[in-house]
Image (spheres, rainbow, N blue to C red):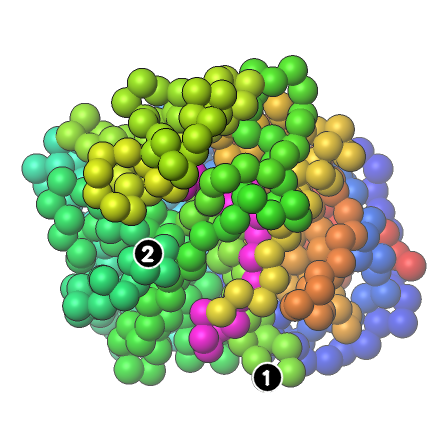
């Protein structure tokens, strides 16, 4: 692998509010004269097969990368990243003694926090285990809500937060509350776990704006499923995606309260700017407009600030519920999906597989008049990234159908996924690079990352696409100030093939 030098052109030191889960809040941003549109692979390491490389976190103190490895094992792999061109496996942290399976990791200034779902029943309370990154000794174990699926440190290191998804068991006989845990690091790791029951009185209003509650019990608190968290640079505010519910929650960290739940609404596929291919049986990539909507249903989320206005960006992946006791997804071609003859006078033609028949829709939504047929068709995900106002939850920008188009231009679009969430935006990270605010979007189904300049949140500019391993899951930006090479790095962990790849931009 070719090694890149560490020559710095016009490097200066400034303080920045760049978001990153790892290490010291007061590390100044090292501004390097880098070309933000030229990220190239400089190193990689394979740590196993499928499921081996899910989420990674970097510790600036030890120059180590910590990667979740669930490939027929239960451990955190430790990788020496002091030379990113040649990463070296060091050891593994065995998680078996903690009676849990790892889902996510985060680091801050010599601490590694691991989110563990309970075993054998993930409906039980989960836990967070904090390790010392130098010797892997346990600093603290903390009980959190059920199924902690994502973990992060606040930028100042004072808080650890987990998104506790609270998924039901297969029969829905147990459905724990979805929740968010806030751990006060400097208060002996005292934990506050918040659920969403207090918002149940707002359900009728939320539903009119696309919020989704649907289960055998329709219990609001247990139906909520927090997925991913981002925290503002001043460590005062957090935003949490509620993927299955098509919403985002806002949390005040000082008061430890959920202050808002933002319903995200729908994407209209009947608009020319949103034209997409929804069939894998139509003989090619054929984008058209359709009388259908898409829930945004974001997975990952990242936040930033421009001109003192907070924003968050979402990866609009989409997700259905499929359990033995409850299923909310079927293809339009299914005989049980009956289209309203007034709304869809050409229903027979639409149900053909080469038309709309292959599209998966939500079967618990769309019967607006309660007569048993579908007056609207609502699909999962929006095949895009979106930027939202962090104060109001109002949309500022949506990438429409550009991710699909750029994937086709790059030669990686997979037509077999056209019927099912397409490129599948999985991860997003926003950061500062020099005087620009840069967005990275991980696309799980085309094995790629797209790069955008979002300095103007209302008008992002596409910069680049680069290839990753199979099914990129974890996306990590290491700023030059914290990088072992004093150059900006992007680390991509791919769960499909267990490969961790490191990317670096060229110098100008």
User: Residue at point 82% right, 49% down?
Assistant: 38
Q: Secondary structure at mark 1?
A: loop
Compared to residue 188, the image places residue 473 above or below, namely: above
User: Residue at point 59% right, 84% down?
Assistant: 308
- Front residue of 233 and 270: 270
- Residue 174 visible: yes
**Numbered badge on residue 308:** 1
- Front residue of 168 and 431: 168
Residue 349 % position (x, y): 49, 21
Residue 233 % position (x, y): 53, 75
Compared to residue 161, the image places residue 324 above or below, namely: above
Q: Would you say residue 390 sits in the magenta stretch?
A: yes
Q: Secondary structure at mark 2?
A: loop
User: Badge 1, how many Cα within 10 Å: few under 14, some, many 20+?
Assistant: few
- Front residue of 169 and 460: 460
Q: Looking at the image, which residue sits at the far left? A: 173
Residues drawn in magenta:
378-393
User: Residue at point 50% right, 39% down?
Assistant: 291
Distance CA(mark 2)–CA(mark 1): 28 Å
- Residue 242 visible: no
User: Residue at point 11% right, 45% down?
Assistant: 217
Compared to residue 175, the image places residue 413 above or below, namely: above
Q: Quarter of the image containing the N terminus? A: top right
**Numbered badge on residue 211:** 2
Give the quarter of the image for residue 172: top left
Query: Along the horizontal axis of the image, is 72 left or right of 322?
Result: right
- Front residue of 31 and 486: 31
Q: Quarter of the image containing the C terminus? A: bottom right
Residue 37 % position (x, y): 81, 52
Q: Would you say residue 113 sits in the magenta stretch?
A: no
Query: Along the horizontal axis of the image, is 332 left or right of 311?
Result: left
Residue 504 % position (x, y): 76, 49
């Amino acid at each position: 692998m070719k090694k890149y030098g560490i020559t710095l052109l016009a490097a200066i030191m400034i303080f920045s509010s760049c978001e990153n889960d790892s290490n010291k809040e007061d590390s100044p941003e090292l501004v390097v004269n880098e070309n933000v549109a030229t990220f190239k692979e400089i190193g990689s390491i394979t740590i196993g097969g499928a499921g081996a490389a899910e989420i990674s976190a970097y510790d600036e103190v030890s120059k180590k990368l910590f990667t979740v490895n669930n490939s027929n094992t239960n451990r955190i792999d430790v990788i020496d990243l002091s030379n990113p061109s040649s990463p070296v496996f060091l050891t593994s942290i065995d998680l078996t003694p903690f009676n849990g399976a790892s889902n996510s990791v985060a680091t801050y200034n010599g601490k590694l926090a691991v989110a563990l779902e309970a075993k054998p029943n993930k409906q039980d309370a989960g836990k967070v285990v904090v390790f010392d990154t130098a010797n892997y000794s346990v600093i603290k174990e903390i009980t959190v809500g059920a199924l902690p699926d994502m973990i992060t440190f606040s930028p100042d290191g004072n808080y650890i937060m987990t998104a506790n998804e609270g998924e039901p068991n297969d029969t829905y006989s147990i459905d724990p509350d979805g929740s968010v845990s806030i751990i006060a690091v400097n208060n002996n790791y005292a934990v506050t776990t918040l659920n969403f029951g207090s918002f149940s009185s707002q359900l009728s209003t939320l539903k009119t704006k696309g919020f989704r509650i649907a289960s055998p019990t329709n219990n609001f608190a247990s139906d909520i499923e927090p997925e991913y968290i981002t925290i503002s640079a001043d460590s005062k505010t957090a935003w949490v995606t509620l993927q299955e519910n098509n919403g985002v929650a806002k949390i005040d960290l000082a008061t430890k309260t959920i202050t808002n739940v933002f319903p995200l609404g729908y994407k209209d596929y009947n608009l020319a700017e949103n034209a997409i291919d929804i069939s894998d049986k139509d003989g090619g990539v054929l984008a058209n407009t359709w009388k259908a909507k898409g829930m945004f249903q974001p997975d990952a989320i990242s936040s930033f600030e421009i001109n003192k206005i907070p924003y968050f960006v979402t990866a609009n992946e989409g997700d259905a519920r499929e359990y033995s006791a409850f299923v909310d997804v079927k293809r339009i071609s299914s005989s049980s999906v009956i289209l309203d003859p007034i709304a869809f006078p050409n229903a027979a033609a639409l149900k053909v597989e080469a038309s709309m028949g292959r599209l998966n829709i939500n079967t618990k939504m769309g019967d607006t008049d309660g007569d048993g047929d579908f007056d609207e068709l609502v699909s999962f995900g929006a095949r895009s990234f979106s930027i939202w106002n962090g104060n109001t939850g109002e949309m500022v920008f949506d990438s429409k159908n550009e991710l699909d188009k750029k994937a086709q231009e790059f030669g990686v679009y997979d037509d077999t996924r056209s019927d099912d969430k397409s490129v599948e935006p999985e991860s997003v990270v926003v950061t500062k690079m020099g005087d620009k605010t840069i967005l990275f979007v991980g696309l799980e189904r085309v094995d790629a990352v797209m790069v955008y300049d979002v300095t103007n949140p209302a008008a992002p500019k596409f910069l680049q696409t680069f290839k990753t391993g199979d099914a990129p899951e974890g996306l990590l930006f290491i700023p030059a100030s914290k990088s072992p090479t004093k150059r900006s790095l992007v680390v991509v962990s791919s769960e499909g093939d267990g490969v961790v790849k490191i990317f670096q931009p060229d110098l100008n």
